Amino acid sequence: MSTTSPLAARAGAVVAEGGSVAAHHGDPLREQRLLAEGAGLVDRSDRDVLAIPGPDRLSWLHSLTSQHLERLADGTGTQALVLSPQGHVEHHLVLAELGGTTWADVEPGTGAALATFLQRMVFMLRVEPALVTGDWALLTLVGPRGSDVLAAAGLPAPEAPYAVAALPGGGWVRRMPALGDGVPAVDLLVPRAELAARADALAAAGAGTAGLDAYEALRVEARRPRLGADTDHRTIPNELEWLDSAVHLQKGCYRGQETVARVHNLGRPPRRLVLLHLDGVSEDLPAAGAPVLRGEREVGRAGTVVRHHELGVVALALVKQSVGTGDELTVGGSRAVIDPDDAPAALDDTRAAARDRVRAVRSATIGR
């Protein structure tokens, strides 16, 4: 079944090549401001969705993933990872537990491989993992007025991070950690056949329309990585904020745990995720995976690169631990500096000077 969104065919929607949801609706920067200051609905129905019912589901997922899931309460959610035996990240799952089913939404295009892996691990347990992207779709409501929109639409508005509540007519709403500079966000899982109708109901309740580009800009500002875009085949959880949000360091054995524990105990992963400020002199943004150079030496890889409505051109990047906030870097021909808040702990006393360098770089791109 095709998962191309019916919302992407509406007037004004601009879909990136190969995409299935709207990247923007004519003005990405205005849409960012809508998300940051009001309430905007983002079509994220390109994400794959898995449903995992069965009485053994939580203990089974607990044994397979990096997260402590044995006692995940009904009406709550969390994040989890599936790792390789060497500890590299293979899948990133955002979970919701509701009514006897564990739901997982994952990166577009990764659901089939995850479903195959899970189905091979069932053995004799009472659990039935299934890829259900053809039946269910994800929407995300972002902005400080999001709870007002939900109330006007007669829908629940969970308050605590990862709290989950059932939606009338099927699906659920899940509170997510804030995007950008503390911008509230909730995910809504709705029947795919009702995607357009549910979006229209939220629009009638006061939600504006925003594309995926606006959401991505606030995600980058929040330093929230995406599997594949901001990671590579060598990425381990310790290099990302997933060590805090998707890994339980005191749980029992799972595949890849030895690497996670060893690096955590040593206290120094080989790379760290940082926010880069680019000078924005080029109209073409560097692609995900572009090398980060210090002089002629490659010291990292860029991930998602965006034009932010306040920060200018910024990017997530995985860089070697030896790279400091004072280092002069280039990405795709643009000058770049690391945000001072992403300095290694030992370099805290250099942050004031690093902020000056950030301002110098940003002055070349703000207003473009």
Image: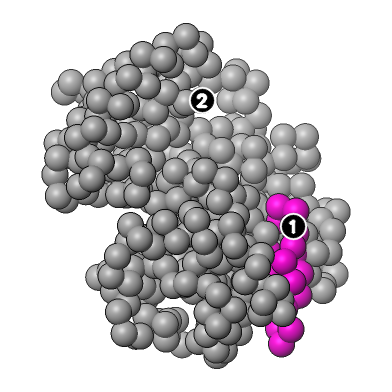
Q: Amino acid at mark 2?
A: Pro
Magenta residues span 156-174
- How much space separates mark 1 and mark 2, taking CA atoms? 34 Å
Judging depth in this view, the residue of 306 and 97 nearest the camera is: 306
Judging depth in this view, the residue of 98 and 315 nearest the camera is: 315
Q: Quadrant of residue 8?
A: bottom left
Q: Position of residue 337 (x, y in %)?
A: 30, 27
Q: Is residue 350 above or below residue 42?
A: above
First of labels 1, 2 by sequence position? 1
Q: Is residue 312 above or below residue 106?
A: above
Q: Quadrant of residue 273?
A: top left
Q: Which residue in the structure is indicated by mark 1?
A: 159
Q: Position of residue 302 (x, y in %)?
A: 31, 40
Q: Is residue 32 above or below residue 329?
A: below
Tell me, for residue 269, which label it has, or none. Answer: 2
Residue plotted at (37% across, 21% down):
355
Give the secondary structure at mark 1.
Answer: loop
Callout 1–callout 2 Cβ contact below 8 Å? no
Residue 173 lies in the magenta stretch: yes
Q: Amino acid at mark 1?
A: Glu
Judging depth in this view, the residue of 317 and 146 nearest the camera is: 146
Tell me, for residue 46, which label it has, or none. Answer: none
Give the secondary structure at mark 2.
Answer: loop
Residue plotted at (24% across, 21% down):
328
Residue plotted at (46% across, 87% down):
1
- In this rendering, position of residue 214 left or right of residue 62: left
Can you see residue 342?
yes
